[in-house]
Image (tube, rainbow, N blue to C red):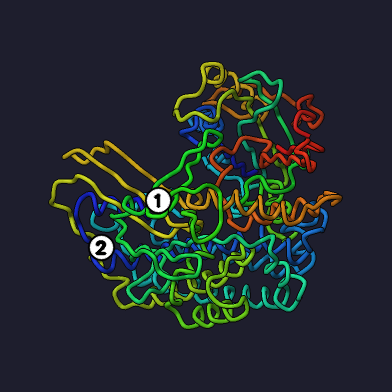
Amino acid sequence: MASGKAVDAVYKTDPPRAAKKLRELFYSAHYVHSHTLHFYALAAPDFVLGPDAKPAERNILGLINKVGLEIGKEVIKNRAYSQDIQRTIAGRATHLVWSLPGGVSKGITEEERKRILEMAKVNLEFAKFGLKLFDDVVLKNQAYVDLILSDAYQTVTNYMGLVDRNNKVNFYDGMVRVVDTEAKEIAKFKPADYLQHIKEHVEPWSYLKFPFLKKIGWKGFVEGPKSGVYRAAPLARLNVADGMATPLAQEAYEKYFDTLGGKPVHSTLAMHWARLVELLYAAERQLELVQDIEITDPKVRIIPNKIPDEGVGVVEAPRGTLYHHYKTDEKGMVTKVNLIVGTTNNNAPICMSIRKAAQGLIKAGTIVTEGLLNRIEMAFRAYDPCLSCATHSLPGQMPLQVVIKGPQGEILRTITRG
Amino acid sequence: MKILLLGLGNSILKDDSVGLKVVRELGEKVTEENVHVEEASFANIDILEAIGPYDRLIIVDSIKTKEGKPGELYPLSLEDLQSTLHLSCPHDINLATALELGKRLGMHVPREIRIYAIEIEDNQTFSETCSPSVERAIPRIVKEIAERECFVFGRKSLGCREEAPNTKHPMTNKFQ
């Protein structure tokens, strides 16, 4: 989606309204798909079964054992619906070849619209259920609320996300807004100006760069108002926005901040709740768009007639603000590409959150149990990071090494997986 | 019997693409109409949608083991991968978990699941071409999988090896 917008910019075209709405409809379905999986398969087991449950049980299979097969079936059904919606709109759910300079390759028929409408209604009901489940399992259990608010899971950073003209969360389009550690706006810029606001720090031990706010500068892996580190993704998007653009998501947004003590929320584990608020927004927005009178308009592309050169496209990927920047020759052949992808924005904060969780949970004399290691991993998992998925070679274990050191820095134990 | 031959991998990460290349070649040669070939970059929860109509699922993927020789073929069963019944990726679930989930939810899961893992050398470099050692092995691997699965190339049967996937294959212990 970011690529499609970058190509529009390269060719200096503005797609027809129907094309933009179709892209946003597709993208809303993508969010439903992505956020549903993360919550039910990866986040919920930690809360429903407990962070100390055995790993063999603390997964989606354990989850359905505890909450019932029906919920498992609903997860599969709702993900399948959102995949179906994406396929219906764009031909493919993943790796689609549909966005073109100036619009999209095809629209949808009235018959397709009606099919999508029925599936979108089901998605909305399930999104509402997700928040209810979170309410019942997590918020009604004071131990979990305390865990979310505990110091070990607080990482005080700046935040970044796309907002619409009313400063509401928007996944597809808008201005990039940045707020500081107290949620005060410190920048709001057009996507094309991103290089004026973001720089990338490099460490010799990582292939992945560490973006930071240029005006503040790189001060290291440190928290607080003087640090240039910022976060993206659900927690950040809710912190930067003034609200949600759909009614039920707005209610959920208000409850979220009321419960967690107002803006900004720095708790990494609150990311799960923020993700469910976004899931509700995506489902509501999907339903709004499929009922929009323009959505079946056959005019879905403007043929570009200008000489291509350079363009930037930005969307909110589920895992953070996604920047695509292309330069081309006069024939449109790409000569230079720069990408900042969702998880990259969170590279420094992920490191900091893991360190803080480890320091907060392991004290002198603490016995490091599997459950404790999982609590540290929870600080990582909350970001829904897209790190080890580039290759899929068997046996498919996520490579992970935990080194436990004593007070003098001596290595007491090394645990390796993958 | 309806068979899904599923190649897994990333087509631009050198040897990671070997599973895709092998099923592509098998797809070009196998003439039986009951064999359907798919290429995918995932083996996660979405696989439950893809495998619904099939009786046998054959997966071809790459593998990296400590002492493996690039190009070596390991026929495995799902049980061999049970030790990985947890996250394979921080934002998804792995194949074994997805299939188990399908079974528990009463969904159709193929009765037979066979996995062919191909030892690789490099899945960290951007390239659409495999390492020479892996590339050279592809024709042999294609032939061996066809024999094990009793596939017919054109009018020519390659003959069947009667062995089932070897659950006690020596490499099994390499990643447990």
Give me the disc on residue A300.
Answer: 2
Q: Residue A47: horizontal and vertical position, in percent? A: 73, 65
Q: Nearer the viewer, residue B42 or A198?
A: A198
Which picture quadrant has residue A259? bottom right
* Residue that carries the numbered disc 1 in the rendered image: A96
Q: Residue A395: horizontal and vertical position, in percent? A: 69, 36
Give me the disc on residue A188.
Answer: none
Three-letter code for the amino acid on which mark 2 is drawn: Val
Q: Nearer the viewer, residue A81 or A217?
A: A217
Q: Is residue B158 left or right of residue A317?
A: right
- Asked if residue B10 shows in the view, the reply is yes
Closer to the chain start, of discs 2 and 1, is 1
Mark 2 element type:
loop
Q: Residues within 10 Å of mark 1 (few under 14, many from 20)?
A: few
Which picture quadrant has residue B108? bottom right
Name the residue: 75% across, 38% down: A409
State whether residue B130 is above or below residue A310.
Answer: above
> Which chain does tag 1 point to?
A
Q: Residue B128: horizontal and vertical position, in percent? A: 44, 29
Three-letter code for the amino acid on which mark 1 is drawn: Leu
